[in-house]
Structure formats: structure tokens, C-alpha cells
Amino acid sequence: MNAKERAEMQSIAKEVLETEAQALLEATRRIDGEFEKAVELMYAARGKCIVTGVGKSGLVGAKIAATLASTGTSSFFIHPTEALHGDLGMIGPDDLVIAISYSGESEELIKILPHIKRFDIPLIAMTGDRESTLTKYGDVFLSIEVEKEACPLGAAPTSSTTLTMALGDALAVALMKKRDFKAEDFASFHPGGALGRRLFVKIEDLMRRENLPVINPGASLREAIVVMSEGRLGNVLIEDENGRLAAVLSDGDVRRALMDENFSLDTEAIKYANRSPRVCRNKRMLASEALELIENHKIQLLPIVDDEGRVKGVLHLHDLVEAGIKK
């Protein structure tokens, strides 16, 4: 691609983004009581929010349903054709329907509207034509009209689908605010995501309990290095005769010991160990909080002890990183 072609492509990209951005800005001026009414209907619905649409509107509708479902509004998508062949049974009297069609005249969609209204199910019409059939069936009209599509032919849904998706996001966010939907609520719907891990994964879920690198206070540096190598944690725990944690020897401590002019592998390891190591007594602490503790104190290993100081497990920085835990 030569310089002229690159410039042309960049110009097209900018024009498309500007056209769609303009469509969103123009839509903000049309937000009125209908939007508020839509939010109230969705909030009051005792059942589910069903989103339906055909073609590009259907694809956008599926995204809107997914966003609603992940933000506290029980929701799913139904294709109008499938609805005509049995899936209408998935819509109950306590549900609410959001129907999307830019023209408001999509044949497959229009066919199911009488069946929806027969059960007096609230219907939110998202369309670009205030006088369309869809609008007439709807209890609420949300305009997705755009001055022009970003497509140079004015044919492919571009600006209109962007606006529809953004309007769906606006409904979801408004409902989140109305329900006082918090980060903890969002995480409960996304337990496998980064936020879910940050808010739900605890130390006890990740800490190592078995085959811990442990030596007694009389063990030599030679013994400590062997145990440290076998444990593969870069540390050894030193426990007293009662099983309480007395000190922690890190590989850094061993390197510093090498600088001692009286260094000997037969010296007791505890001489070079940290006798006041940072520990945690709450295995129910969030792993994200443990990560913050580890990073703030510039350590790699966090021993988990009971009220008597006995080691119950350890949490290594690498375990947190591998689990995708972030502060």
C-alpha cells in the first residue's frame, strides 16, 4: 500500500467514526420521557427481558441481551423466525420484550407482535420510524433514526446499528443505577473474569498446604539450601519445636550470607534468616489483598499461620500471577 492509499484509508476511517459519532450526538438530543418510561417498564418487569430482531438488528439485539444479563437484568435473545416456530412459548406473561427494526416493518418481526400483545406483554419498540407498524404495537418508542449511514451506499447498517447498541447500553446503565448494582454484583455474574477473581478468590483457594519447605532451627545452611531447592519456592520456613514459625530464609538471604567473611555452609541457617517475617493469619483474605501485601513489602512468599503461629500454608507471588490476580 503506497502513501496515497494509506492516506485514503485513514481518511475513510476518520469519516466513518465521525459520521457514527455524530449520529450518537444527535440521538442525545432526542432522549425524552420515552427513555425514562422504558427504564421503568424494565425495572418493574417481574419476569425476563426478551430482545428480538432480524439481521443486523438481531445481532445487535443479542449483544444488548447479553449486556443486560450481565448487569442484573435477566435477559435473553429470541430470533423472530424461531419464535414463530415454538420459541414464543419462552415468553411469559411477566416478561417484557424489546423489539428492534430500523424500518419497523421487518416481516418476520411484525408477524410475532400480535401474539406478544395478545398476552398484554409490555413492548419497547426500537425503530427509526415513528409511524411504523412496530411503533404502533409498542408501549414505548425509542428512536434509532440516523441522518445517514456511514456506508457510502447508505445501504449497510452502520450508524444505525452503532446507535442501537449504544441505546441498549444506556438502558443497561440506567437500570444498574436504579438497582444500585455494584462491582460485587457484576463480579458475581463474571466469576471467571478479572473482576470476579479480584473480588471472590481468597488466599485459601490458592495457598499451598503440602510438601512445604520446612527445617528446624538447628538446621545448617547446607540443609536449608537442599530443602529450598527441592521446595522450588525460593524460601524455607524455619519452625520451632512446637511447630510455630520462627523465621523465613529466602534465596536473597543466602546470597547475602555468601558475603559474610565467616561464611560456612555448616552455620545454622537461622542466623541469616528473617526472624520477623511478614505473615497472614486470615486465610479468608482476598487474594487481591494478599497480592497488595506481598508487593508492598517486596516479598515473594507469604506464610499463612493460625492464631498460635503454626504454618497452615504459603502463598507465593507466582501463584497469584498464574491465577490472574490483580490489585
Image: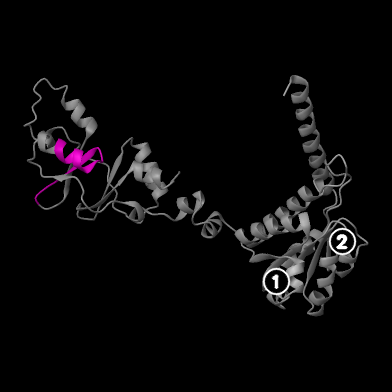
Residue 242 in view in this figure: yes
Can you identify the residue that label 1 sits on?
45
195 on left or right of 164: left
Picture layout, residue 60 above or below residue 85: above
Outermost residue, front side:
1
Q: Position of residue 319 (x, y in %)?
A: 35, 45
Can you identify the residue that label 2 sits on?
104
Crowding near the residue tagged with mark 1, few <14, some 14–19, many ≥20 C-alpha atoms within 10 Å: some
Q: The residue tagged with tag 1: helix, strand or loop?
A: loop
Residue 176 in view in this figure: no
* Residue for point 79% across, 27% down: 8
Q: Quadrant of the C terminus?
A: top left
Q: Which residues are magenta?
A: 225-241
The one nearer the camera, 183 or 106, is 106
Q: Quadrant of the N terminus?
A: top right
Query: Which amino acid type is marked by label 1?
Result: Ala
Residue 173 lies in the magenta stretch: no
Q: Position of residue 209 (x, y in %)?
A: 25, 54
Query: Which amino acid type is marked by label 2?
Result: Gly
Crowding near the residue tagged with mark 2, few <14, some 14–19, many ≥20 C-alpha atoms within 10 Å: many
296 on left or right of 165: left
* Residue for point 79% across, 59% down: 35
135 on left or right of 210: right
Q: Identify the image's colour scheme: rainbow, by chain, secondary structure or one colour.
A: one colour
Q: Position of residue 305 (x, y in %)?
A: 24, 52
Q: Position of residue 283 (x, y in %)?
A: 32, 55
* Residue for point 75% across, 59% down: 58
